[in-house]
Image (tube, rainbow, N blue to C red):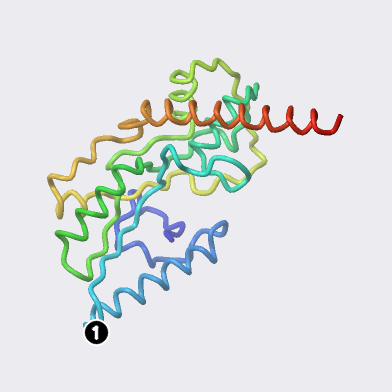
Amino acid sequence: MYGNVPGTDPLGEEAGFLGEPEAANYGYGWAKRMLEIAVLTAARDGKCEGIVARPVNVYGASYGWFGEQSHVIPSLVKRMLDGEDPLTIWGDGSQVRNFIHVSDAARGFVEMSRRLPSGTVVNLGPKDAASIKDIVDILRQELNVPCRVDHDLSKPTGPTNKQVSAARLRALLPDYGTGFVLLAATLTWLALAIMTWFIWKKHIWRTTKSNATNEK
């Protein structure tokens, strides 16, 4: 929902309605803004209790990492395990984003619902961010995939630095650990992802072989 607002990195909650949402997520960004207005208006008018949590990019073992709608981390894992070499990434890899593991996000939602007053708006994520290049390097090392990396500078990459502030979260929930950055649970997640991937590949192989046998 955050727009391209110069001079506001990391983005605090107050920047949520500054400017227009970025062009690539224009409709999606406005839909999120309207939902926030609906929740906060209902909470203000006493019709319900509501908290607005703005999670950063979520990743985890059950994330959809097939197809064009897959997000960056699951997409990179799939493509590396597919043997893509060179691995082509959009832009020069300097784009900076915040990431949070699904287990940390779920714990954050529970803690917010239990402890924060109705009407609160808060970013949910770690205080640190990672560049796409950092993510690629970490995954290459953990997956032991020494693929080459090419950069497609003709593709859109969004803002170079889209980092949100975790200051309000840390002030409201000081005991909620946000030092996990990118890899708090990535090793566990990668093990699950690799296992799931090979099970899926094996299923496809068996299905293809069975279909070929039945056609004979």
**Observer-nearest residue: 201 or 141?**
201
Residue 98 placement (x, y as % from top left): 37, 43
Q: Quadrant of residue 45?
A: bottom left
**Dot 1 surroundings within 10 Å: few (below 14), some, or many (20 or more)?**
few
Amino acid type, label 1: Asp
- 92 to the left or right of 58: right
- Which residue is drawn at the image coordinates 48% and 20% (left, top)? 143
Which residue matches tag 1? 45
Residue 196 placement (x, y as % from top left): 50, 31
Residue 22 placement (x, y as % from top left): 51, 58
Q: Quadrant of residue 112?
A: bottom left
Quadrant of the drawing holding the N terminus: bottom left
Quadrant of the drawing holding the C terminus: top right
**Observer-nearest residue: 53 or 90?**
53
**Observer-nearest residue: 196 or 42?**
196
In this view, 170 is above or below 136: below
- Which residue is drawn at the image coordinates 43% and 37% (left, top)? 61
- Which residue is drawn at the image coordinates 45% and 41% (left, top)? 62
- Which residue is drawn at the image coordinates 18% and 49% (left, top)? 170
Secondary structure, mark 1, is loop
Residue 83 placement (x, y as % from top left): 63, 22
**Observer-nearest residue: 184 or 161?**
184
In this view, 50 is above or below 139: below
In this view, 202 is above or below 44: above
